[in-house]
Image: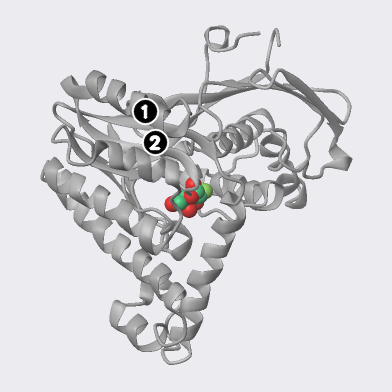
């Protein structure tokens, strides 16, 4: 695209701790990373939407009046934000859209949320819609629900939009109040190991976990009408009202309640620069996700096993929705190279798969790119 009207960049995200808590009105601790999606848009005179993805090297064309989800297709993440605008009465024209970037797809780093956020930011700029950041986040989340079919929480979009260099975001997903927590890692770095698998059941299992949490809440609510979400539930309530009904639902809910408590203590650890204690909590989260919430998989568990009892790794856990994607590891900087060699070699030996790794830095959130020519390939 030679002369776009607007270019926006939006980052991928990591999550330090607080997994599967966002849709239960709990707490999360994500951060934006130095990997981005770039979206360049030109207004058209007609009603056509002409999209091009450099990653897939594919064009996709449709009309504004024919907007619909294309099962599993990359275009959903751009197209999905448009119906939200149209329904609210905003008028938009046809568009040429170029999508580029370097967030690995399917790695659990929320490349889809980054595309949605970049798209809505760009449209906001282009048509001067005056949307607030929270309105744009909600529109991006709706696009994921309605076009991608995943009933995700708000974490990924919030992290992409509100990211701040060198800080994690402690977000209360009930009130949407948030606090930036400095990520002072001293001589440690965050290293992601990518399983390079994404098992099919990821989105159906995600939606099922959500329902199981809601079921747990409904059983507690029969006795405690004031309870709205798992945020209001305690372990004794679960013991009394949920365990007698269903052991699986009990474990799901217990994990979420424990994870919220771990997260609040992890923020304290970060404030006190106690990385050892933070690392232990990350590892405890993996146990909970693997055994109680059951969203891990053999490849993720293997990557955790391979760094276990290594004194240079303070903590490690699967990250994101689960069933593939990355683990996040808090690793001593001068031990990274050796660790990567060991993990890659053993992972390949035991699974026959390559495992990629990324040493990530924490970056700023979604923004308009003033100097386009540097970021766009074509
Ligand atoms: C996915 C979802 F999109 C998030 O909302 C969150 O629930 C996460 O899985 C699990 O913590 O990334």
Q: Secondary structure at mark 2?
A: loop
At a point 23% along the width and 20% down the height, the residue shown is 338
Tag 1–tag 2 contact (CB < 8 Å): yes
Number of the label disc, if any, that sits on residue 363: 1
Q: Position of residue 350 (x, y in %)?
A: 40, 33
Quarter of the rendering occupied by the C terminus: top right
Q: CA distance from mark 1 to mark 2?
A: 6 Å
Determine if residue 33 is in view.
no
Q: Quadrant of residue 184?
A: top left
Q: Position of residue 253 (x, y in %)?
A: 40, 71
Disc 1 CB within 8 Å of nearest ligand 1 atom: no
At a point 62% along the width and 30% down the height, the residue shown is 122
Quarter of the rendering occupied by the N terminus: top right
| Crowding at mark 1 (Cα within 10 Å: few <14, some 14-19, many 20+) | many
Q: Quadrant of residue 13?
A: top left
| Crowding at mark 2 (Cα within 10 Å: few <14, some 14-19, many 20+) | many
Left or right: 93 as drawn, with respect to 36 = right
Left or right: 33 as drawn, with respect to 199 = left
Label 2: which residue?
A: 163
**Figure check: 251 above or below 225:** above
Disc 2 CB within 8 Å of nearest ligand 1 atom: no
Quick one: which residue is furthest to the bottom in this view? 223
At a point 33% along the width and 83% down the height, the residue shown is 239
Q: Nearer the viewer, residue 229 or 96?
A: 229
Q: Position of residue 243 (x, y in %)?
A: 39, 83
Ranked by sequence position, the earlier of labels 1 and 2 is 2
């Amino acid at each position: 695209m030679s002369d776009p009207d607007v270019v926006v960049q939006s980052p991928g995200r990591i999550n330090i701790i607080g997994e599967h808590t966002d849709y239960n009105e709990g707490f999360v601790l994500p951060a934006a990373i130095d990997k981005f999606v770039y979206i360049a848009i030109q207004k058209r005179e007609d009603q056509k939407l002409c999209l091009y993805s450099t990653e897939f090297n594919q064009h996709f064309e449709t009309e504004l009046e024919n907007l619909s989800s294309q099962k599993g297709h990359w275009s959903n993440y751009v197209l999905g934000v448009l119906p939200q605008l149209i329904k609210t009465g905003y008028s938009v024209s046809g568009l040429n859209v170029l999508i580029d970037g370097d967030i690995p797809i399917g790695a659990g780093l929320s490349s889809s949320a980054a595309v949605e956020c970049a798209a809505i930011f760009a449209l906001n700029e282009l048509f001067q819609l005056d949307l607030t950041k929270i309105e744009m986040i909600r529109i991006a989340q709706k696009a994921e629900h309605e076009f991608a079919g995943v009933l995700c929480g708000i974490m990924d979009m919030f992290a992409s939009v509100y990211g701040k260099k060198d800080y994690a975001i402690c977000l209360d997903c009930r009130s949407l109040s948030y606090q930036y927590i400095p990520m002072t890692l001293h001589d440690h770095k965050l290293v992601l190991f990518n399983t390079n698998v994404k098992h099919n059941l990821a989105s159906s299992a995600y939606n099922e976990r959500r329902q199981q949490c809601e079921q747990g809440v409904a059983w507690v609510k029969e006795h405690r009408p004031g309870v709205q979400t798992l945020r209001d539930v305690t372990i004794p309530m679960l013991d009394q009202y949920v365990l007698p009904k269903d052991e699986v639902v009990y474990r799901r809910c217990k994990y979420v309640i424990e994870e919220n408590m771990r997260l609040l203590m992890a923020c304290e650890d970060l404030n006190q620069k106690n990385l050892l204690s933070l690392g232990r909590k990350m590892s405890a989260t993996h146990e909970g996700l693997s055994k109680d919430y059951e969203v891990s998989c053999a490849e993720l568990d293997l990557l955790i096993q391979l760094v276990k009892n290594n004194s240079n790794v303070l903590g490690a856990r699967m990250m994101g929705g689960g069933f593939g994607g990355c683990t996040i590891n808090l690793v001593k900087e001068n031990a990274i190279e050796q660790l990567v060699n060991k993990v890659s070699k053993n992972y390949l030996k035991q699974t026959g798969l390559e495992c990629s790794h990324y040493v990530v830095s924490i970056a700023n959130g979604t923004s308009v790119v003033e100097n386009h020519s540097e970021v766009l390939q074509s």
